[in-house]
Amino acid sequence: MRLRFWGVRGSIPVPGAETSRYGGNTSCVEIFEDGCPTLVFDCGTGARPLGRELVGRPERAVHVVFTHFHMDHLFGFPFFAPLYTPAFAVSVTAPMFTGDATRERVSRYLNGVFHPLRLADIPAELEFLAVRPREPFQRGPYAIRSETLNHPGGSCGYRVEKGGKVVCYVTDTAPLTRPGEGLAGGGKPTARERQLVELLRGADAVVFDTMFTHEAYLERMTWGHAYPEYAVALCVAADVRTLYLFHHAPEATDDELDALAERWASATHPTVKVAREGEIVDLEG
């Protein structure tokens, strides 16, 4: 099982010289294995280059799973090439009550007004599905379960298992406790933190929203994003192997992300890395 980052930014795409090394596309992460349908988390602008690659592969199926429907996680969906490929099977899953509700939510954006594409225009084979928090589900060969997060309007984090390997994708979320309390405060986890720790338990790789510094988080506590120290505290409690800091702030330059990587370079439990667009992680390695 392999993991690839196609978009690592939050809020809005930021192409340019100051973001060229880590990338400026918004959230899109691929989990894949040769001979299996690809699993895609979120369709930010990173979904556009991913889609172009997918239509060149022999597999004719892809499973798209959304954490939520804020625009930075949806920007790239109308530009996702499998949608325009006849006989390509595209399943779309979101944290909704029914598949019809997922379809209706996507159609609010693809309605000929906010974007010229409408669902009725898509030639691919589309299926809309729903997931409820903590209910396990299967997409292709991947066993998945979810957990509710702390974000305005709601969001879900996911745990993916296949062949004894585990990847967790946790964005967008603020800490699940008040400052100075719970794991980041050096205390015992709160009830909600315990649930999230169990989602992360023993994962080989965790992709976690760390948009803010701790100081910036204290000024923006209601915005629904976390900071590296919080992600590390959760991953230590969950005995995670590697943590990828993700959903970088649009104003974060490559130099600032280099400094962030340097700050955490000596961490070993877990190993801490800064997610970089284009990076491929081989979980078998």
Image (cartoon, grey):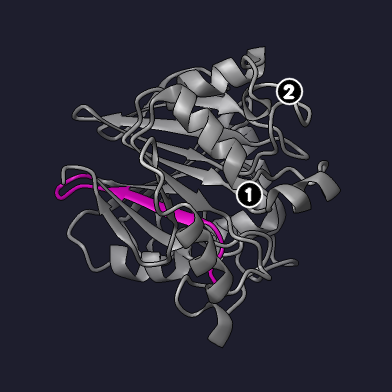
- Residues packed near mark 1 inside 10 Å, few (<14), some (14 to 19) or many (20 plus): some
Q: Name the one closer to the observer, 120 or 277.
A: 277
Q: Please give the residue where the numbered disc 1 appears in the rendered image.
A: 106
Where residue 107 sits: x, y (%)? 66, 51
Circles 2, 1 touching at the beta carbon (< 8 Å): no
Residue at image x 58%, y 46%?
228
Kindly state the secondary structure of the residue where label 1 is placed. helix
Q: Quadrant of residue 173?
A: top right
Q: Quadrant of residue 16?
A: bottom right
Image x and y of residue 133, in percent: 57, 22
Up/down of 198 relative to 77, above or below: above
Q: Report the number of discs.
A: 2
Magenta-highlighted residues: 24-36
Q: Is residue 34 left or right of residue 27?
A: left
Q: Which residue is mark 2?
A: 181
35 inside magenta stretch: yes
Question: Is 240 a magenta residue?
Answer: no
